[in-house]
Amino acid sequence: MAISKFNYNSFNVTPVAGAALAFDADADGFSTATSTALTHIKTLTASSSATLSFVDGSSDVVFDNTYPVYLFKFFNIHPASTQPFLFQGSTDTGSSYGVTMTSSAFRVFNNEAGTSTSLSADTGNDQAQATGFQKLHGNIVNSNDHGGSGELYIFSPSSTTFVKHFLSRINASLDDAVVQEQFIAGYFNTTSAIDAIQFKMNSGNIDSGTIKLYGIKDS
């Protein structure tokens, strides 16, 4: 079997930010290609962790104007004790977390027997011009086979013109054979850039679980 050899001097591939190398039908066989819109940035895995923090410029984290939208995905967040799951932002690269925010919340639940269902506003989990950590889910339990999974979007966190909007949804199974999904929407009421995000339980550690950060390119 003959081996085909390429002359690297004949490659006509110009590096382009956000592009990948692809095969095509041209004489040199290569071209640049647009990569996927969702780009993985960083994964943090909890192990009896008090907090999990994503700080721009630290430990390979990118959280600036590189992407217009950032997405955090949560996988099986399991607390050391049954607690709400929280987040907050920082404008000083993680030196402090307490940005003023306004948010709204609602939740839906159903039990395994299908005899108890609800869809309602959750005014106890929203904030009005407050600086505390925002509850993403009000009650993630620590039973052996329970936890919470979901996602959080943050839009244009590095803008110095507009407030920073966010949307989240997290689903968790509860001790009393109930599934509860929590929806949160709001904004950081600041025109300073948000350059770090921290997650924690209301009390105690995150026993286990994974959080992945992605950047989403312009469409």
Image (tube, rainbow, N blue to C red):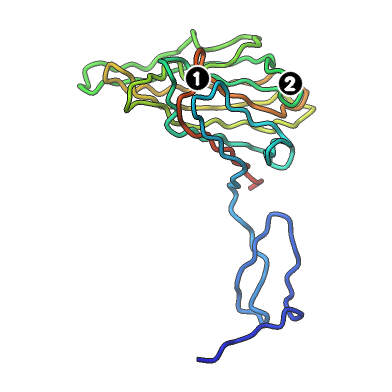
Q: Amino acid at mark 1?
A: Asn
Decide which of tag 1 and tag 2 comes sooner along the chain: 2
- Name the residue tied to disc 2: 95
Residue 100 vs 193, above or below: the answer is above
In percent of width and height, residue 195 lies at 72, 29
Task: Name the residue: 55% across, 38% down.
Answer: 212
Q: Nearer the viewer, residue 168 or 94?
A: 94
Answer left or right for 104 relative to 32: left
Neighbours of disc 2 within 10 Å: few (<14), some (14-19), many (20+) = few
In percent of width and height, residue 82 lies at 40, 15
Residue 22 vs 5, above or below: the answer is above
Q: Give the image quarter of residue 77.
A: top left
Answer left or right for 131 relative to 190: left
The image shows a total of numbered marks equal to: 2
- Name the residue tied to disc 1: 205
Q: Which mark is residue 118?
A: none
Q: Identify the element where label 2 is drawn.
A: loop
Task: Name the residue: 69% across, 31% down.
Answer: 55
Question: Marks 1 and 2, Cα distance to the nearest angstrom?
Answer: 20 Å
Neighbours of disc 1 within 10 Å: few (<14), some (14-19), many (20+) = some
Q: Amino acid at mark 2?
A: Ser
Task: Name the residue: 57% across, 88% down.
Answer: 3
Q: Nearer the viewer, residue 1 or 39?
A: 1
